[in-house]
Image: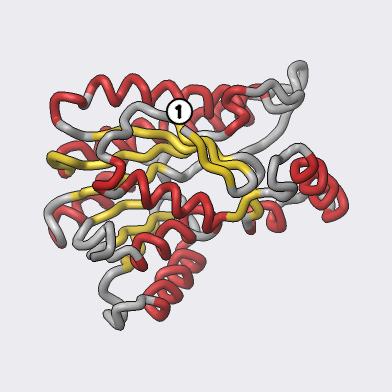
Amino acid sequence: MPRLEGKIAVITGANSGIGLATAETFLAEGAARVYLTGRRKTQLDEAVATLNVLDPTGSRGARAVGVQGDVTNPVDLDRLYEQVKAEVGRIDVVFANAGYAAPSGLGGLTEEHIDGLLNTNVKGVIWTVQKALPLIGDGGSIILSSSIVGTKGFDGWSIYSATKAAVRSFARTWAADLKGKNIRVNAISPGVIQTPAWTESDLPEGQVNGFFDFAASITPLGRIGREEEVAKVVAFLASDDSSFVNGSEVFVDGGIAQV
């Protein structure tokens, strides 16, 4: 039996990249319904259409559902969870994946830069999880998206790194908060992963490729990670197979996963 058989999942930031790859993996693992959120409706609709065409069960248009919204807007999250409650009545898995990265060095930090990252990467995670709690029952799994930069000090990335360090802390403290409800909370911390976000960025192609080469050179497998590899780790944490894992951070870098 697929390890996510019958589960109801919510994935934020699932228009593309790790979120979309995770949605595809969840469906392949038997999830009964996967709700995807994203700010860009056109891209979200395309992602949902693709997922339902790929649906290995042949259940077209039924298991992947897109709900357009921004995690920084509590009203959008309320609308998401109201729809989930009305349609299926519960949530088994929340993958709080929405977030973004933007560099800026000390001395050049602006209110816009700081507020943007904190609102999406920190407050967005808080509201995503807190507002989902009334629908999450015994045995539920919450997975947060952190990053290896939460434990490293790269120049120019202080605010982004701080947001991901906060997410690491949430996994530990929320696991303690929810232990009496048998709801697990874990974080994944990917390294450099090849996703569409890199090609959609304003960075020159040569700079991106040079960074990929550098990251590969310091990774044990000699390559950067792939979004489907991260998705498989998230699927494990979402499954009952990981019932012994709680309050942990799982590093995924160059195809290697370690707790």
Say left or right for 47 vs 141.
right
Name the residue rendered at 73%, 25% in the picture.
154
Q: Residues within 10 Å of mark 1 (few under 14, many from 20)?
A: many
* Residue 2 shown left or right of residue 87 in the figure: right
**152 or 124, which lies in front?**
152
Q: Is residue 139 above or below residue 164?
A: below
Residue at position x 33%, y 63% in the image: 29
Residue 249 x/y as whole percent: 45, 30
Q: Which residue is mark 1?
A: 167
Direction from residue 62 to residue 13 in the image, left or right: right
Residue at far right of view: 206
Residue 221 at what x, y percent from top left?
69, 47
Work out whether 199 lies above or below 110: below
Residue drawn at (62%, 24%), measured in percent from left and top?
159
Q: Considering depth in this image, is 131 or 192 the residue closer to the camera?
A: 192
Does the rendering let one see residue 100? Answer: no
The residue closer to the viewer here, 40 or 151, is: 151
